Image: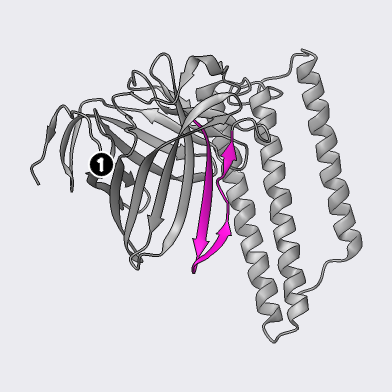
Amino acid sequence: MLPFPSLELSRATRLGIAGLMAILIFGITVANNGVSASSSSNGTVAASPAMLTAKASHFASLNAAETEFWLEVAVAHNGHGADFSARIAAAFGHYNDVLFLASEQLAARINLIDELGPEAYQPRIDPSNFSPNISNPYYPLVVGQTRIYQKDSDDGLETIEVTVLEKTQVINGVTCRVVNETTTNHAGDEEEVTVEWVSQDSSGTVWSFGELTKNYENGFLDNLDGSWRYGKNGAQPGITMLANPQAGAIYRQEYLPAVVEDVARAHSATTSITVTAGTFSSCVMIVDSSALEPSASEQKFFAPGVGTVAEVDLEDGSILMLVEICGPQIPIPSLSRGK
């Protein structure tokens, strides 16, 4: 049987974390007082808001990993089963995996500082500058329209339906269009249901102001992982589509530390792609990534007058394709309906 750590060791661990928190708070105080700090090896300021946020998020991940481990130990003890040692060993293994991922996440966050800058991410949002009527040519939202996508996965065909509702909601002062997205598996069972709130600024840039994501397992609501809302717990809005996407542009798509940290990089605006719904030209190609999943990224293709037509998972090669557009439509330039 694996040794059970003593309460004294656990207390020492807690004191160690408290010490790290004290150092962190001191660092924040120094930064807020305008005291200059030495630069880190990659050229960013060690006590900058972005660096301190990255480190604090890392500490939160470590603490969450420790909490999850001890809960697994508690469940194993409560079970008193013959598989106790195996469960403890599995808990240790998972704990180590999470620690390794946390280190990768920290490295990804630090690397992003070089691209996005060392300042805090707090976009200035004037609610009077936004409208729920989304007319961006690369991300048009037509009320009443449903776009159907499909993807072959290891578990069979996956279907995603995206519906633009007439309904609007006010998020921290900003009037947003409500968009529903439902993911079903090959058996027709719901796996994920997402409500997203989006709004467009006066320049034509489309912003996301939050998501409510319901993840299901075997027909039961399992969790709300990935949910966030502008203004709650410090969550910040992000850009869904630029008014004029130029190759090389990089921007945050949504931001709440340790919950959603998606970043987009714009590439070519002349790409052509053929999917089930047809052939689309003059598409903008954007690569999405997240510091929370450093090894994962996606290529997304946006056609003028349509929006998203394909998503390519660069980790496993799977492709999500537009299959059909139902309901009201707008004239679509550069579109061939040939199959």
Residue under the image location 35 percent in, 68 percent down: 187
Q: Quadrant of the N terminus?
A: bottom right
The magenta stretch spans which residues? 208-229
In this rendering, would 131 be left or right of 94?
A: left
Check disc 1 and report the residue beneath it. 327
Residue at 44 percent of width and 26 percent of height? 132
Q: Where does the image place residue 318, in percent across and percent down from the top left?
A: 31, 53
Label 1: element kind: loop
Left or right of 84 on screen, residue 156: left
| Residue shown at 59% from the left, 43% from the top | 259
Residue 1 visible to the viewer: no
Q: Is residue 221 magenta?
A: yes
Circle 1: is it few (<14), some (14-19), or many (20+) Cα within 10 Å? few
Is residue 100 a member of the stretch shown in magenta? Answer: no
- Residue at image coords 71%, 80%: 84
Image height check: is 334 above or below 220?
A: above
Q: Amino acid at mark 1?
A: Gly
Measured along the vertical axis of the image, is residue 7 above or below residue 135? below
Q: Farthest residue toward the left?
A: 338
Percent coordinates x, y for residue 19 in the rendering: 86, 40
The image quadrant of residue 92 is: bottom right
Pick the front one: 45 or 181: 181
Image coords of residue 137 (percent x, y): 28, 24
Q: Is residue 131 above or below residue 213?
A: above
Principal secondary structure, stretch drawn in magenta: strand
Closer to the camera in the image, 29 or 149: 149
The answer to whether residue 84 of the structure is visible from this angle is yes
Color style of the picture: one colour
